[in-house]
Amino acid sequence: MSDGFDALRRANPRARTGFAESIEVAAEAVRARIAAAPPGATSRRRRVPRRRLVGISMACASAAAGAAVIVALGSLGGGTSIGSAHAALASAAGVTASSAERSGTATVRITRDGEAWGSTTVRWGQGDVAIRREDRPEQAGALMLLVDGTVYGVEHRGEWLDLGHPGNIDPDSGTTPAEYLAAVREDVGGATLRRLTGAMRNLSRSERNDGSVVYSGTVSAGLIARERGFKAGQHTRVLPFGYVAHGEAADPDSQLRTTVTTGTDRVVREIAVRWGTWRYTVTYDELGTTPAPVAPENAKSLEDLRRQQLRGER
């Protein structure tokens, strides 16, 4: 009998390394999924008394924690299992997306053979967006604002132009400002982040000396660079925040090496994708605290300038 009890004690999952972490990670994942649910997601369901809702939430957390424990018991090496790594990444993505839907700043860089290919900073808040092309600050279109439904741009002399509604600009260009801004809003709103983190395969986890955590794996190129662009008469696959995909990234079946880095607060700080000699990174900052873009003062109306030009031609 004593041998039997000793065996049971040794098999108790609470004695295994990483048990407490697995429970906490699974609970965080459940809370993140509940917090990230759309506001109307529960409106169609029958109302449940508050006490029962608490019981259901606790039951869900217990079930998720139990699933993490089962995975941990099945791992040979002990410690944090692959299942709990997925749960931790899902939790980080949920929390990050919730903050990003309010406001934030993203710095996007792409290099080839170690040389800069493009760099853009995107800042958003209260439904408005500011996009700055850091790699071509002197060119027309390097800075664009969308504030209260109006697009503003900078002309070659550095003066602001009121370009009007985004849907009225370059309607035959293939990728209009309205389409581009809609894609950027999807990228900053958390949908892209959830899609990339949820699709990672062959996931591994490593912790750095500064407390940050790096999750590594692969993601199908078709989930990273989705076809939504049109250039030179051809449909193109576009990376998040507007860069055209080249090489393997243009093949939707390619598996691209992807890493997601979270800070000590377990909020996503960087997503990096590599293929061939290309490297694409998105760094997040000031999520939930970035000030909303404001309309520039004394912006010239493009419509007024066009009318003046027509009168001058007459």
Image (cartoon, grey):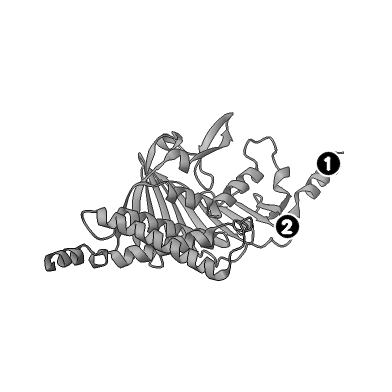
Q: Residue at x 55, y 58 (%)?
A: 37
Viewed as shown, does residue 247 lie left or right of 133? Answer: left
SS under mark 1:
helix
**Residue 17 drawn at (x, y percent):** 24, 64
Is residue 59 in view from this perspective? Answer: yes
**Residue 185 drawn at (x, y percent):** 59, 51
Q: In the displayed structure, would residue 29 be above or below residue 192?
A: below
Q: Residue at x 34, y 58 (%)?
A: 68
Which quadrant, please, contains the C terminus? top right
Is residue 210 in view from this perspective? Answer: no
Disc 2 marks a residue whose amino acid type is Ala
Which quadrant, please, contains the N terminus? bottom left
- Quadrant of the rendered image containing residue 125: bottom right
Q: In the displayed structure, would residue 186 be above or below residue 171?
A: below
Q: Nearer the viewer, mark 1 or mark 2?
A: 2
**Disc 1 target residue:** 310
Q: Residues within 10 Å of mark 1 (few under 14, many from 20)?
A: few
**Disc 2 target residue:** 299
Disc 1 marks a residue whose amino acid type is Leu
Viewed as shown, does residue 17 lie left or right of 145? Answer: left
